[in-house]
Image (spheres, rainbow, N blue to C red):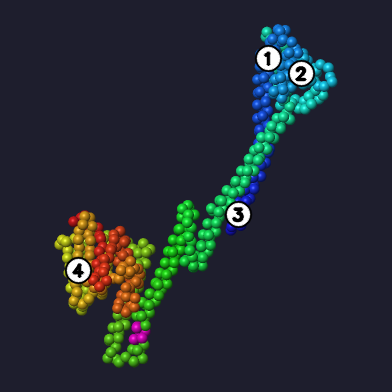
Amino acid sequence: MKRSLWLKLMFCYFAGAVIMFVLLNTYGAKRIEQKLIDEKKSLLYNEATSISSDYMTIYYREQLSLNYLTTQIKTIGSKLNARIWIVSKEGDVITDTKPPKNTDVTINVLDINPDFLDSTFSDYTYMRGILPEPMISVVYRVVYKYQLKGYIVMLSPISAIKESSLYFIDTINICFLIFLAFLFLMFCYIYYLTIIPIKTMNKAAAEYIKGNYSHPLKMKRKDEYGELANSLSYMAGEMNNLDDYQKKFVANISHDFRSPLTSIKGYAEALQDGTIPYEMKDKYLGIILFETERLNKLTTSLLALNSFENHGTILDIVSFDINHIIKKTAESFEGACTGKKITLNLIFSSKETYVDADEGKIQQVLYNLLDNAIKFSHHNSTIKVSTTEKGDKVFVSVKDHGIGIPKESIKKIWERFYKTDTSRGKDKKGTGLGLSITKEIITAHNENINVISTEGVGTEFIFSLPRSESF
């Protein structure tokens, strides 16, 4: 890729240089030459006007000799690098600032070119034997007392114009060559700014394709390339996390499915081959049913999470008394609380507190939070469930005095299959999905859920719901 882009840059560079050089030395040279010719004609015409007003009127009054007139116009012609003719109305050249050598023959321009004196300006005038080279010519008509008396003809060699034009073109070419050198350095700088970072990012992308998401991509730049590199690096980090999550997901779900399946298979085979006495079959059938229910619960939880992720769950928002739902949910844990001698304290800020939410989903949230609180509470402890109204919000709190959550685990409790007990020995009934489902439900309601926990002291979950305006 590097070679290809570099060749393209160099092709553009040289193509641009050649095109510009050709344009400068063809069209540009012609334009400069024509510009110099136009300026020269204008200058010659102005000088012809001055000669006519300063000398020709006096000459036709016979107050100025021809020799003096010739001397004066020779001086002017020398300054202008021009040949000046004074021509009679019959076409005879009566004075010439640069007459041909060794000839005393009077020149009649009308004999050479009958139309010569009719054109004020001419870019190309050549008279064999009279003019040594092509000239620019300006013909100025001299009028005295409303009568045409003659002409002032200003001649300037085209070769001088071409020399001046070449001088300008050479100067421009030199400047252009210097510019090309700077332009080459600019192309090299552009290559460094663009191609090098693209190559670096392409190399990193190739590593990411291979699955090496830990490949470093550090570009200390604050431009668009730096932003793109940061985006790629962030994407790689997210993909790396996703890869780790997928591995953990597969490991966790394999574990959670394998354990009950192993129990079901083992006890079913034992019942089949008679290893288990007939009088004990009800006990082990109960275990099989328990493990089956555990698998069903795990599958249901996974489907619930999947529906949230795909935005397939439609919330059935109704107005209901959250206090009543808390009481009903608490009643379902009466047996579990009795077994651990746990007391449930329900504290409400008012007798009835109505909220706008999905009643079934919120009951599932309360069930998951109470289930967790009971599971991780000590015997003979207390769990407090309370509701508080603040503005247009209702805050629900579930607080236990159990084992608490380690500080390093608080941010991870919302992850699927995460359990604070890494040995997984204390919580064989749990799927590790309860809090994930709880988080998804509250988020689907555009509300928040927070956790406050101190290891060895207890844990409090607080979530918000919109208070109903109907009551």
Query: Which one is earlier in the sequence, the residue at label 4 or at label 3?
Result: 3
Which numbered tag is attached to residue 52?
1
Give, as a three-letter code, the residue at label 1.
Ser
Q: In which quarter of the image is residue 55?
A: top right
Residue 354 at x, y percent in the picture: 20, 60
The 10 Å Cα crowd at callout 2, few under 14, some 14 to 19, many 20 or more, is some
Q: Give the range drawn in magenta.
A: 263-268
Residue 83 at x, y percent in the picture: 74, 22
The residue under the point 35% across, 89% down is: 270
Which image quarter holds the C terminus? Answer: bottom left
Q: Are marks 2 and 4 in contact (CB under 8 Å)?
A: no
Per the model, the C-alpha gap separating discs 3 and 1 is 66 Å
- Tell me if 186 is positioned left or right of 151 in this view: left
- List the single residue furthest toward the left: 351
Label 3 sits on residue? 6
The residue under the point 51% across, 65% down is: 207
Label 2 sits on residue? 96
Give, as a three-letter code, the residue at label 4.
Lys
